[in-house]
Amino acid sequence: MCNEGKLRAIQDEAEPGIFVAAYKCNKCNEIAYSEEVMAKVEAMRRGDAERRSLIKIGASLAISIPAEIVKRLKLKPKGKVYISAKGNEIIARIART
Ligand SMILES: [Zn+2]
């Protein structure tokens, strides 16, 4: 914020199709959210995580990847991924060759 302009209440599109209360500076056009709205927006962005069950395949476990992600990342059956674990998270890095 430049701290010079006046803040005007607006509706900001935080995510496609999702409007939240925000403030816009009339001088630098910067947009600010209240702490409450900011927390909700962050929770929503994290919330892209879908709950899945692990599937047993022999001695391994498999995770099914939600269709939306398959489409967005253009994944194909038999495509290769590199799986690693970091703390409590499993990271699947797509091998593009
Ligand atoms: Zn400003």
Image (tube, grey):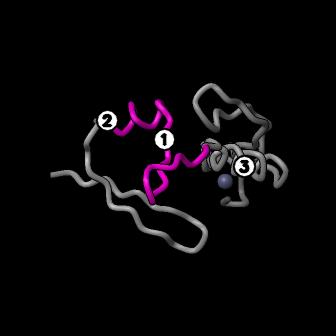
Ligand 1 within 8 Å of the CB at mark 2: no
Residue hosting label 2: 74
Q: Residues within 10 Å of mark 3 (few under 14, many from 20)?
A: few
Q: Secondary structure at mark 3?
A: helix
For the residues bearing labels 1 and 3, Cβ distance under 8 angstroms: no
Residue 28 as seen in the image, left or right of residue 56: right
Q: Return the x and y of residue 72 as percentages of the image width and height.
A: 40, 34
Q: Please state which of residues 55 and 3 is positioned toward the viewer in this rendering.
A: 55
Span highlighted in magenta in the image: 53-73
Residue lying furthest bottom in this view? 87
**Which mark is in front, 3 or 2?**
2
Q: Amino acid at mark 3?
A: Ala
Q: Amino acid at mark 1?
A: Ser
Residue hosting label 3: 43
Q: Return the x and y of residue 73 as percentages of the image width and height.
A: 36, 39
**Which mark is in front, 2 or 1?**
1
Residue hosting label 1: 64
Residue lying furthest right in this view? 36
Ligand 1 within 8 Å of the CB at mark 3: no
